[in-house]
Image: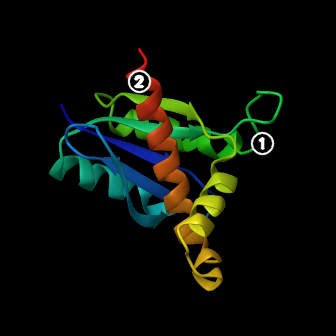
Amino acid sequence: MGRVLAIDYGRKRCGVAVTDILQIAANGLPTIPSGQLIEFLTDYCSREQVERIVVGLPKTLSGQPSESMRYITPFLNRLRKLMPEMPVEMFDERFTSTIAHREMIAAGVKKKDRQRKELADETAAVIILTDWLNSRRFI
């Protein structure tokens, strides 16, 4: 079994999370500038055993892909071209930013720290990966 990486893709920066080797829990990794994400992924996957990459799928409330797919699709195409052997999967990310902020409040994170967008992106990636893990446990 290998690790699973999750990405909360954004125009400026991307939240990244990874499971342990047994795929039990998700932990955040440092937020990566979007322009450096492919380099980060190829480097990380060369050092760690990664089984798959899960990318947050932004949807509207009606369930349609959101406008954000305009810049996520080129990233996905490039990733699949550079790492053709790596399974890449999309997973619904609706409300992860809202949930991330609520979780930070519940955890007692100070308001000044909650305003750091990097922390919100990292937390959103952890939520995406945790939700993905939970969805797999019922299969």
Tell me if mark 2 has few (under 14), some (14-19) or many (20+) residues whose alpha carbon lies within 10 angstroms of its own. few
Q: Which of marks 2 and 1 is nearer the N terminus?
A: 1
The residue tagged with tag 2: helix, strand or loop? helix
In screen coordinates, is 20 left or right of 53? left
- Quadrant of res 2: top left
Q: Quadrant of the N terminus?
A: top left
Question: Viewed as shown, does residue 8 lie left or right of 129?
Answer: right
Disc 2 and disc 1: Cα gap in Å?
27 Å
> Looking at the picture, how far across and down is residue 87, in whole percent?
36, 28
* Residue placed under numbered mark 1 in the picture: 67
Q: Of the numbered discs in the image, which one, if any, rests on residue 24?
A: none
Task: State the image coordinates of residue 74 (x, y, percent, origin top left).
Answer: 57, 41
Residue 137 percent across, percent down from the top left: 38, 24
The 10 Å Cα crowd at callout 1, few under 14, some 14 to 19, many 20 or more, is few
Residue visible at 41% across and 33% down in the picture: 133
Q: What residue type is labelled 1?
A: Glu
Residue furthest out toward the right: 62
- Quadrant housing residue 22: top left
